[in-house]
Image: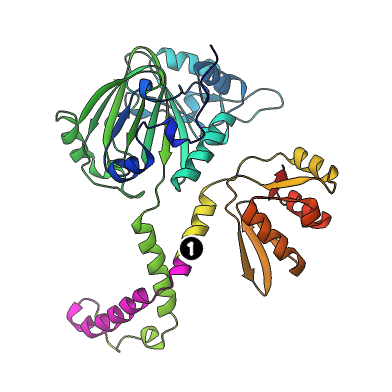
């Protein structure tokens, strides 16, 4: 019997509820366990145990693309790395020989940043990040039987846990600190985490192959492999927050105050910083100016800053230099070019020139290029006849478009 078709929506592979229900009832609020029987397809097309062996033994991975943990602690890189021999003497390459011994002794392997090294995961993570509107990373955890990789903790990003092989018992507790920011790790609240972990769990469940668990940031969790080797893939969603908006508003407000001569003025001669009461009038003056600067902050500028941060936080779809050069050499009037996936392009003005900005970089445009590039951004593809041969070549060599 042929394999069922993989759904086009990445999120539909992870949750059985519709998008609106997930957005309003679960996103950032509640944990959600979805069983394999409720989902359209297993996760072995993304990762399996043969892939794990290939990655750590044949692909020349280097630290930190792999971590190894045991008894809740991360081992030093030298315990699982070694030089690669003649022509590859770099000392921090993963040593499969060392891993065999460590894994056999109960250590957990953590394959990090798989969204950079394994093509099926690269494609899936790119699609999921596009749907969610937030950056996504992928790590895999491979745990020997009856072992626990890490103690109870919380993450500062949302996670989807995709059980790939084996079984693992998960214990989930409610947050001790709701919606933690990236600089608010669980180690800052270690005692509270330990106390909460001793209480009855909110969820205690065994994940089997094909199951998926969604955890908003802050939810405490720990997992133990049962019966055999357990492999799960964790998709970490680094959510944009209202605090990020506050940072942008504050940055813009401070830039505004830098242009205010009164705020730039010196404090009184003989000011004593040890007496806060002497600063009252100055504080009130600055507070009023700051509040007004925040109130009048430009929404487009705030959105633009966040857009630039988002652009820097993700990568466009992979593109091959050889394939791009082949496409340049094969250009003809009937050729069709399409925008590279996950590019986040914008057409901006800078120094009196039009600039195409994207995750591929910047491309300065001539006046005659603007209209066809606008049409390309609107439609997602364009023919060489519409672009012109010179612009088509520049877009290909700028890694903005690929052969359609």
Q: Nearer the viewer, residue 313 or 326?
A: 326
Q: Tell me the magenta residue range.
A: 273-302
Q: Is residue 194 left or right of residue 314?
A: left
Q: Nearer the viewer, residue 354 or 256?
A: 354
Label 1 SS: helix
Picture coordinates of residue 228, whole percent (x, y): 37, 11
Q: Nearer the viewer, residue 10 or 203?
A: 10
Picture coordinates of residue 388, whole percent (x, y): 81, 57
Please tell me whether residue 137 belongs to the stretch shown in magenta.
no
Q: Is residue 225 above or below residue 326?
A: above
The structure residue drawn at horizontal position 53% and vertical position 24%, both measured from the top left corner, is 5
Q: Main secondary structure of the magenta part?
A: helix
Q: Is residue 338 left or right of residue 201?
A: right
Picture coordinates of residue 269, whole percent (x, y): 30, 89
Quarter location, residue 71: top left
Q: Which quadrant is home to the C terminus? A: top right
> Can residue 139 be seen in this snapshot?
yes
Question: Which residue is tagged 1?
Answer: 305
Quarter location, residue 208: top left
The structure residue drawn at horizontal position 44% and vertical position 75%, both measured from the top left corner, is 255
Q: Is residue 354 left or right of residue 44?
A: right
Picture coordinates of residue 110, whole percent (x, y): 44, 27
> Can residue 95 be seen in this snapshot?
no
Q: Residues within 10 Å of mark 1 (few under 14, many from 20)?
A: some
Q: Nearer the viewer, residue 294 or 77?
A: 294
Q: Is residue 239 above or below residue 306?
A: above
Q: Is residue 291 left or right of residue 319?
A: left
The structure residue drawn at horizontal position 74% and vertical position 69%, both measured from the top left corner, is 367
Q: How is the image coloured?
A: rainbow
Quarter location, residue 117: top right
């Amino acid at each position: 019997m042929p394999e069922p078709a993989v759904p086009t929506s990445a999120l539909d592979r992870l949750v059985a509820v519709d998008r609106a229900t997930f957005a309003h009832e679960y996103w950032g609020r509640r944990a959600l366990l979805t069983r394999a029987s409720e989902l359209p397809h297993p996760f072995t097309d993304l990762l399996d145990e043969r892939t794990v062996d290939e990655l750590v033994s044949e692909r020349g991975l280097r630290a930190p693309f792999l971590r190894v943990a045991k008894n809740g602690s991360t081992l030093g890189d030298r315990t699982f790395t070694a030089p690669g021999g003649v022509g590859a003497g770099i000392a921090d390459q993963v040593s499969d020989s060392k891993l065999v011994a460590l894994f056999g002794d109960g250590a957990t392997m953590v394959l990090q940043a798989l969204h950079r090294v394994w093509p099926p995961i690269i494609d899936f993570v790119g699609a999921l990040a596009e749907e969610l509107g937030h950056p996504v990373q992928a790590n895999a955890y491979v745990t020997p039987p009856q072992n626990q990789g890490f103690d109870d903790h919380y993450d500062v990003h949302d996670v989807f846990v995709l059980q790939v092989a084996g079984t693992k018992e998960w214990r989930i507790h409610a947050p001790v600190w709701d919606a933690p920011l990236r600089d608010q790790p669980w180690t800052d609240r270690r005692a509270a985490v330990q106390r909460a972990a001793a209480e009855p769990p909110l969820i205690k469940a065994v994940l089997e192959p094909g199951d998926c668990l969604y955890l908003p940031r802050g939810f405490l969790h720990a997992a133990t492999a049962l019966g055999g080797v357990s492999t799960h893939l964790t998709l970490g969603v680094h959510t944009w927050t209202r605090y990020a908006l506050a940072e942008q508003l504050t940055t813009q407000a401070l830039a505004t105050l830098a242009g205010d001569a009164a705020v730039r003025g010196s404090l009184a001669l003989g000011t004593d910083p040890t007496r806060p009461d002497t600063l009252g009038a100055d504080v009130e003056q600055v507070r009023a100016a700051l509040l007004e600067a925040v109130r009048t902050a430009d929404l487009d500028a705030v959105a633009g800053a966040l857009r630039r941060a988002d652009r820097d936080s993700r990568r466009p779809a992979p593109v091959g230099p050889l394939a791009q050069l082949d496409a340049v050499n094969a250009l003809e009037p009937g050729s069709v070019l399409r925008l590279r996936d996950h590019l986040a392009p914008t057409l901006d003005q800078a120094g009196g020139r039009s600039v195409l900005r994207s995750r591929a970089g910047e491309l300065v445009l001539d006046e005659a290029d603007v209209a066809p590039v606008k049409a390309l951004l609107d439609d997602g593809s364009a023919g060489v006849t519409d672009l012109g041969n010179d612009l088509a070549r520049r877009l290909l060599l700028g890694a903005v478009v690929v052969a359609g």
